[in-house]
Amino acid sequence: MQKVAVFGAYGHTGRFVVAELRERGFVPVLSGRDAGKLALLASETGFEARPASVDDPASLDRALDGAAAVINAAGPFAATAAPVIEAALRAGIPYVDVAAEIEANADTFARFGGRARAAGAVVVPAMAFFGGLGDLLATAAMGDWTAADEAHIAYGLSSWHPTEGTRASGDVSRERRDGRRVRYANGRLEYRTDAPPTLKWSFPEPMGVREVIGEFTMADVITIPSHLPIPEVRTYMAAEAAADLSSPDTPAPAAADEHGRSAQTFLVDVVVRAGGAERRAAAGGRDIYAITAPLAVEAVGRILTGRTKATGVASAGEIFEAADFLSALSPHITLELHR
């Protein structure tokens, strides 16, 4: 059985990743900077713990020794992505992360695109609910289109109880953009100081029409344009979920089933338009943190079995057959594809 290192294994999302790897027949190698938390997780799971720090390259090399791939689940990714990618390149193994940070994902493409491609390496950032899933849905909706005028990704979350990692990553992103908000228009990122618009979005039934925050920009504005020529990429967030995220009093997610998933549900609705034509794809499921695990682990499985279309730094929709990948997630999501 192949070993897969998980950096940040004891975090909220990391624990889902470890469980999914075990379910899929991989052997997780537990890593991260907190030796105490790793030891506790090792005692719970029986898997090997290898403490490592992004400030200590040798410790990362030891953590990845003998692993077939590494999944980075430790944010803020502005601090962890580059050191773990460097370690993966030294080890000659694929790297996958679950970063939702716009700037961190942009850094990965800019900093490692040429090097990874020259080395024939595989680096897949944002292989998660934000970034990866939207990219797969947009790519699947495009079908045989080679370009589009605009893509819209609407997130219908029933609630959003953010993890400590989500809050920390959000703080880093806000600092990096000086408190401004960001959107993707005219083929580039634009930073703005005005308030985002509030509007209505018609989700597929049974969700129906909901109030959303427009230009609530997520990692899709990095992943989708990285390989699809679409000059306008807009993302939207259900108003209730946005309010949860912005409130400092919203608690962390709480387990509501035997798998540790929360009661949160989601519906991601993607519309792409070209000329007067429109195509659509939607995916529904439960718990945005839990669904990240099968996304990342399915990616690793496909990379290790050669079911890829690209090397270098590549987003989900570029490196995988999008519709087939989404179909493989059928135990975890419902899928509607109209093209």
Image (cartoon, grey):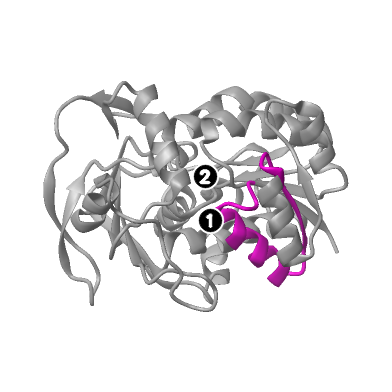
Q: Nearer the viewer, residue 102 or 121?
A: 102
Location of residue 277 (image quadrant): bottom left
Marks 1 and 2, how far apart at CA: 16 Å
x 55%, y 50%: residue: 127
Location of residue 143 (image quadrant): bottom left
Of labels 1 and 2, earlier in sequence is 1
Q: Is residue 27 magenta?
A: yes
Q: Is residue 229 magenta?
A: no
* Residue 50 vertical placement versus 86 (above, below): below
x 79%, y 45%: residue: 50
Residue 181 drawn at (x, y percent): 26, 31
Please give left or right for residue 229 compared with residue 276 in the image: right
Please give left or right for residue 311 compared with residue 277 in the image: right
Task: Identify the element where label 1 is drawn.
Answer: helix
Q: Is residue 160 visible?
A: yes
Location of residue 246 (image quadrant): top left
Question: Callout 2, which amino acid?
Answer: Ala
Question: Callout 1, which amino acid?
Answer: His
The residue identified by callout 2 is 126
Task: Identify the element where label 2 is drawn.
Answer: loop
In the image, which residues are magenta? Answer: 8-35
The residue identified by callout 1 is 12
